[in-house]
Amino acid sequence: MTDAQARQPVLSLRGATLRFDRRTLWQGLDLDVAPGEFIAVLGANGSGKTSLLRTILGQHPLSSGEALVAGEPVTAGNPRIGYVPQQKLADEGTPLRARDLVGLGIDGGTFGFWPSRSKRARVDRLLADVGATDYAEVPVSTLSGGEQQRLRVGQALASDPVLLLADEPLASLDLTNQRAVSELIDRHRRERGFGVLFVTHDVNPVLPIVDRVLYLAGGRFRIGAPDEVLRSEVLTELYGSPVDVIRARGRIIVVGTPDAGHAPHDEHHDAGHEDVCDHNPEDTEAVVL
Ligand SMILES: Nc1ncnc2c1ncn2[C@@H]1O[C@H](COP(=O)(O)OP(=O)(O)OP(=O)(O)O)[C@@H](O)[C@H]1O
Ligand SMILES: [Mg+2]
């Protein structure tokens, strides 16, 4: 890598705006992601996190503004981007083995059924990198959520990306696996120098490794270090209604966020305590981000 490449942002967004019909998901988004930088993308259900990743993947055009990946305009199927899509576990009965899943990240299955020796060696290395050697030959559908998620990270890293987009990679994992998957991505972004956009509803498992937070809400956003963005006054201003950020035993809890579907000053705006986690809203008023 040349010095210029090492300094060039792996992702640049300038005035990036996405609208569906009349609804603005986010607008005027300016963001440069440096090589090796880890950015947590936060926001309620429907705030436009997945749509942001899909835009960078070239699956939706921006409504306005510009998006560059390693200095080049966004294109569909860009091998410089690794993608861990929002979780879907393997269907039961899928004959795909763990090593097949990782191998798909190298060639998308285009090199046929019998892998070359060099591809096999690369798959072995990737399986070892994500701690999946022990279950390399096992059908993916029989693996636990955490084991499958490690493989999907391995698959996303297979093309040696400059940018990793991970959409809720911790969803439905227990604390041990949340830590394992976070540490895996953290170690590889340091070793290989790829930037990371990491979508999560709970920032706590990644708080020690996050460089910056991108918080989407009501068509607007805030970007900054976790301590700059995850503050009561900042989120109250962003949402346009009272929000409390509470720190308890080293965890950050956000209370009182309204529904993502409403603009901050929408007249139908409901400033209730809408849950933005996958928890049952009846269970708790507290929103853990
Ligand atoms: N192709 C599309 N056409 C129209 N509306 C869309 C399209 N894709 C997404 N949307 C809408 O954009 C909004 C944001 O969706 P998105 O999936 O980006 O949210 P999200 O922040 O990832 O939410 P979650 O936390 O639930 O995953 C939703 O209201 C969704 O219905
Ligand atoms: Mg999503």
Image (cartoon, rainbow, N blue to C red):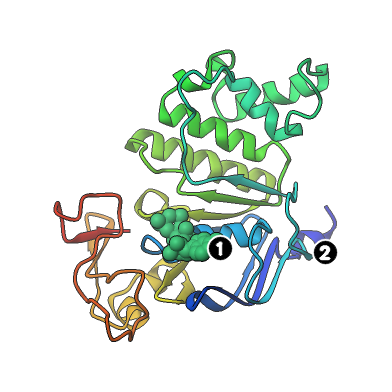
Quarter of the picture containing the C terminus is bottom left
- State the residue at coordinates (37%, 60%): 45
Residue 147: x and y in percent read 47, 27
Which of 171 and 223 lies nearest the eye of the viewer?
Answer: 171
Looking at marks 1 and 2 on the same chain, the residue that comes earlier in the sequence is marked by 2
Q: Which mark is residue 52?
A: 1
Vertical relation: 135 (above or below) 186: above
Residue that numbered label 2 is attached to? 4
Q: Is residue 212 visible?
A: no
Vertical relation: 204 (above or below) 26: above
Q: Which mark is residue 40?
A: none
Which of 148 and 36 lies nearest the eye of the viewer?
Answer: 148
- State the residue at coordinates (57%, 17%): 95
Most extreme residue toward the right is 2
User: Is 202 displayed left or right of 245 in the figure?
Assistant: right
Give the amino acid type for the residue marked by disc 2 in the picture.
Answer: Ala
The reply to whether the residue tagged 1 has its Cβ within 8 angstroms of ligand 1 is: yes
User: Is 117 displayed left or right of 41 in the figure?
Assistant: right
User: Is 158 displayed left or right of 219 in the figure?
Assistant: right
- State the residue at coordinates (63%, 21%): 99
SS type, badge 2: helix
Give the amino acid type for the residue marked by disc 1 in the picture.
Answer: Leu
Q: Quadrant of residue 192?
A: top right
* Figure disc tally: 2
Q: Is residue 239 visible?
A: yes
Which of 35 and 100 lies nearest the eye of the viewer?
Answer: 100
